[in-house]
Amino acid sequence: MPRFALLAMPVRIVMNLLSGSNTPFDSMPVPVQTIMRFSPSTHFVARAQAILFRHGGLAAGWKEFRATAVNDAVLFTAPPPRFRKTVSEMEG
């Protein structure tokens, strides 16, 4: 477990820094912006900023909510078949 924490810490720090919560998303290089568009934290930050700072309603962050929902749907439907295959291989 300590090994996992040591490996996860740098990833979480970088993902937090590149999510747009600490630095403006538009000031990042275009390749980094393109890569970070696949991260759910980027869409969450954009949605939270639209609702909290700009006093928009739920309609203001609808695009980001949709992107997060699609991302979550892919991440929750893609791994289970591979997990089942791995478990069945381990069982023999």
Image (cartoon, rainbow, N blue to C red):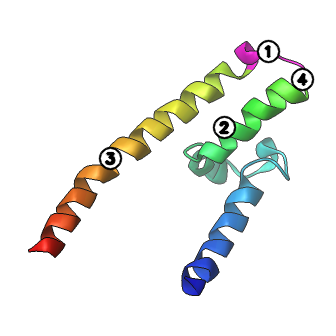
Please give the label number shown on residue 43: 2
Task: Say if the magenta span includes residue 58.
Answer: yes
Give the residue at x 85% y 51%: 23
> In the rendered structure, which disc, 4 or 2, sits on the residue that comes first in sequence?
2
Q: Nearer the viewer, residue 42 or 72?
A: 72
Which amino acid type corresponds to the residue marked 1 in the rendered image?
A: Gly
Give the residue at x 54% y 45%: 38
Rounded to the nearest angstrom, the CA distance separating label 1 from label 3 is 32 Å
Please give the label number shown on residue 78: 3
Seen in the picture, residue 65 relative to 91 is either above or below; the reply is above
Rounded to the nearest angstrom, the CA distance separating label 4 from label 2 is 16 Å
User: How many residues crowd mark 3 within 10 Å: few (<14), some (14–19), many (20+)?
Assistant: few
Residue 32: x and y, percent?
A: 65, 53
Rounded to the nearest angstrom, the CA distance separating label 4 from label 1 is 9 Å
Residue 48: x and y, percent?
A: 78, 33
Residue 59: x and y, percent?
A: 71, 13
The residue sitting at the bottom extreme is 3
Residue 25: x and y, percent?
A: 77, 44
Task: Say if the magenta span includes residue 3.
Answer: no
Which amino acid type corresponds to the residue marked 4 in the rendered image?
A: Arg
Q: Which residue is mark 1?
A: 57
User: How many residues crowd mark 1 within 10 Å: few (<14), some (14–19), many (20+)?
Assistant: few
Please give the label number shown on residue 54: 4
Rounded to the nearest angstrom, the CA distance separating label 2 from label 3 is 20 Å
What range is drawn magenta here? 55-60
The quadrant where residue 90 appears: bottom left
Disc 4 vs disc 3: Cβ atoms closer than 8 Å? no
Q: Position of 48 compared to 3: left or right?
A: right
Disc 4 vs disc 1: Cβ atoms closer than 8 Å? no
